[in-house]
Amino acid sequence: MADRDDKDLIGVATMNRRGLLKCMGWAGTGVVWGLSGGVPRTLGLIGEASAAEVKQAGLTFVQISDSHIGFHLPPNPDPRATLSEAIDKIKAMPKQPAFLVHTGDISHLSKEQEWDDADQVIKSANKQVFFLPGEHDVADADNGKAYLARYGKDTKGKGWYSFDMAGVHFIGLINVFEFQPGFKSAGLAKIGDEQLEWLEKDVAGRSASTPIVLMAHLPLWTIYEQWGWGTADAGRALGYLKRFGSVTVLNGHIHQIIQKVEGNVTFHTAASTAFPQPAPGTAPGPGPMKEVPAEELHKYLGVRTVNYVRGKGAPALIDSSLVA
Amino acid sequence: MAYWKIAVPLGALGLTALLFAAVLETPLAGKAAAQAAANAAAVRIDNFNFTPLTLVVAPGTTVTWTNADDTPHTVREKDGKFKSAALDTDDTFSQAFTAPGEYEYFCSIHPRMVGKIVVKPAGKSS
C-alpha cells in the first residue's frame, strides 16, 4: 500500500513486548505473518488466491470496535475522547470510506446515555454506520431489549442482517445472545439455530465468486477457550460459506489484533478504541490492561480500513493505531 | 469445603432469629424484618470469579453480590429466575431466597463465570 506508514501500524509496538500473534495483511502483495511462541511463521497468502472478483469499481469501508463508552477506569478514563480521535482519523483519510461498521461493545453498560454519547461522536464522521451488539450492549436486565429498540430496526430476528455493497455481500451476525453458561461447558458464545438457518438461506443461490464479509462481535474461531474467546457453533456458519472464494471475517471483543487464514477464509479481530486486553493467557483474566501508561495507550487503540480493489477477490486490510 | 464455613454461622443466625421472634411473639412484619436483617449473605465478584462459588443459605436469606472487579458483570439465574442489570465496579445486586433449592447462575457478559446458591433449612444435612 502506497500510503502505508509503518510506524502507524498496530502491532509493531506490541509485537516484541508481548510475543503474541500480531500481524498485518494486505491483498495482492501481502503475506500474513504470525508470531506464535516467538517463532514467526507464514499463515498463508491472501489476495490472488481468491477466485472472486469485486464487480464494481472497488470499495473501501472502515471497521471500528469496542468503544466501551461509559468505561471510566485505568488505562482510559475517557473512552469518548479516544473514540472521537478514531473518528477524526477516519475523517482525515485521503480515500473516504463508503461506510463504517461498528463490531460491538458500543457502550460499557447498555445505558442510553452511553449510546447517546457514542452516536453523537460517531455521527460526526457523516457516514452510514452498520452496528452490531457486543455483550456489553445487551447487558440490561431485559436481555438486549434496549439495544434492539435503538439499533435493531430493519434487522432480522435478534438484530442480524445482510446487505450488498459494490458486489460484496455483508453479513452481520449476532453472537451475544445465546451464550452457553459455563456450568458444563467453556462458556463460549453461540449464534443459535434460528440465525444459522437464516444464514444458510441468505447465502444459498449466491455465486461462489461473491466476496463475503462476515461480521460478528465475538471471534468466530476459538482463540482462547479459558476466557470464552470463541463461538461454539461458528463451524456451522463457516460451513455454509465454504464454497465462496473469499470470506473475510471481522470481529471485535478481544481488544487486540489477531489474524488467521484458513483456506479462503481470513479471520481478523480488531483493536478497541477504548482500552487493550491482555494476550490470551498472559494475565489472570481478560480485563482491561490497567497498567498501560497514558502515553502508550494510543498504540493499542485503532481503526481498520478494508479496501476491495477492482478485480481482486480478497480485500486489503490496514490497521492503523491512534498514535498521531 | 469452603462454603461450610459460611453455611454454619448463617444457619445458626437464622435459627436464633426464628427462636427469638417466636419467644417474643413479635408481629409478623417485625419477625420478617428481624429475619431479613439476620439472614444476609454476600458474594464477591473479582477477577472474573464469584466467591464463594457455592453459597449455602437458609430460606429467607438475602444475598448481595458486590462487583469488586474493574470489569462489569451480571448475575443471571440460568432459567431467568433472577437477573441483575450490568453491575459496574462497586455496584451491588441483592436477591432474597425463600424457596429451598439450588440456584445456578452465571454472568451473561462472561458466561464462563458461574456460581450457585443452595437454599436449605438450617440444621438439615445435605
Image (tube, coloured by chain):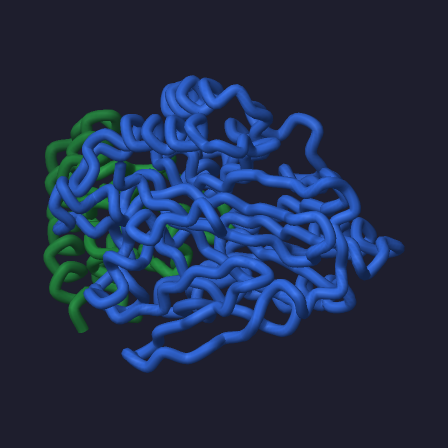
Figure disc tally: 0
Q: Is residue B114 left or right of residue B25?
A: right
Q: Nearer the viewer, residue B96 or A61?
A: A61
Q: Is residue A213 left or right of residue A294?
A: right
Which colour denotes chain B?
green
Q: Nearer the viewer, residue B110 or A247?
A: A247
Residue at 23% across, 29% down: A78
Q: Which quadrant holds the C terminus of chain B?
A: bottom left
Residue at 26% across, 52% down: A287
| Chain that appears blue | A
Q: Which quadrant holds the N terminus of chain B?
A: bottom left
The answer to whether residue B106 is visible is no
Q: Nearer the viewer, residue A132 or A111?
A: A132
Residue A163 placement: quadrant: top right
Q: Position of residue A262 (x, y in %)?
A: 59, 72
Vertical relation: A78 (above or below) A294: above
Residue at 19% across, 26% down: B30
Q: Is residue A267 left or right of residue B94?
A: right
Q: Position of residue B114 (x, y in %)?
A: 35, 59
Residue A204 placement: quadrant: bottom right
Q: Nearer the viewer, residue A137 or A15?
A: A15
Residue that sits furthest to the right in the current view: A205
